[in-house]
Amino acid sequence: MRIFVGTGGYSNEDWRGILYPEDSKPSEYLEIYSRYFNAVEVNITFYVIPGRRTIEGMVRKSGDLKFSVKLHRSMTHDLTATPEDYEGFFAVLEPMEEAGKLGVFLAQFPYSFKDAPKNRSYLQSLAEIFSGRRLAVEFRHESWDRPESVEWLHDIGLYRVSSDYPPLRKLPKPRLYVKDGFAYVRFHGRNTRTWWRGKDQRERHDYLYSYEELVHWVEMVEARREELSEIWLIFNNTTKGHALYNICMLKKLWPSLPTRIDELIRC
């Protein structure tokens, strides 16, 4: 089983003194990050589709990293993306694909995107657009948790993201979804106080998992090890460096985890 572990994004100023030296420059972050992890989730593409040169620069600085690339919000939230938008998106990412470093695309849908006929139709179209490319989809409404919904997603060629959310009403439950030997897990933190009321993403993801909470995921993965050939473990609780400490903790529970963060920080 190949394991890819990393965080949602890497440009976090509050990681100075934890992962990044105090005197490091933002332009050095990715190269430093790549010394300790083998995967990263690219979040900037949700807000703006960068230029080709930006992607080429990321590839040069990324060492042995594999990338997960989040779809632009016009493709998951506004639902206004045109065929030309997708063509431009794929064209910009060609350097990453050609280098063999693009591992998966990620479509993160909002809470309002429920399991309904019109949304299934949209996903069917998305599956066709990404035919031949691996696209993992994440939902924030529990209507997509039904077994028939998961089976339908897998039948049309999409991969259901396994999400760890706060234990709040109507949010999906923490389950491990596997299709064709592949699984993608996102850890968002379990801050019930700020998930809906936090003023920004930083407050929403301000949460440090306990060893007990991480053990539950290790047990779920190990129970299905024979089904798995590749799994991605992405921690989005990046506030205050929580993700870094949690990956360090996970390494203690799972010694074969491909990360060196435990050589840098104490956990």
Image (cartoon, helix red, strand yellow):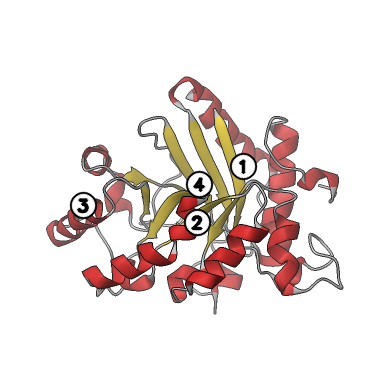
Above-or-below relation of 168 to 255:
below
Dot 4: within a 10 Å radius of its alpha carbon, few (fewer than 14), some, or many (20 or more) residues? few
Helix, strand or loop at disc 4? loop
- Badge 2 is on which residue? 96
- In whole angstroms, how far apart are the C-alphas of marks 2 and 1? 34 Å
**What residue do we see at 74% from left, 45% from top?**
248
Mark toward the start of the polypeptide (4 vs 1): 4
Compare residues 66 and 230 and report the one nearer the observer. 66
**What residue do we see at 75% from left, 66% from top?**
15
Outermost residue on the top side: it is 226
Which image quadrant is residue 169 in?
Answer: bottom left
Helix, strand or loop at disc 3? helix
Residue 260 is situated, as x and y percent measured from the top left of the image, at 77, 43
- In whole angstroms, how far apart are the C-alphas of marks 3 and 2? 21 Å
Above-or-below relation of 121 to 262:
below
Tag 3–tag 1 contact (CB < 8 Å): no
- In whole angstroms, how far apart are the C-alphas of marks 3 and 1? 37 Å
- Badge 3 is on which residue? 128
Q: Nearer the viewer, mark 3 or mark 2?
A: 2
Inspect the image, locate mark 3, and give the three-letter code of the amino acid beneath it: Glu
Residue 89 is situated, as x and y percent measured from the top left of the image, at 37, 67
Compare residues 261 and 237 and report the one nearer the observer. 261
The disc placed on residue 97 is none
Residue 194 is at least partly visible in this image: no
Helix, strand or loop at disc 1? helix
The disc placed on residue 100 is 4
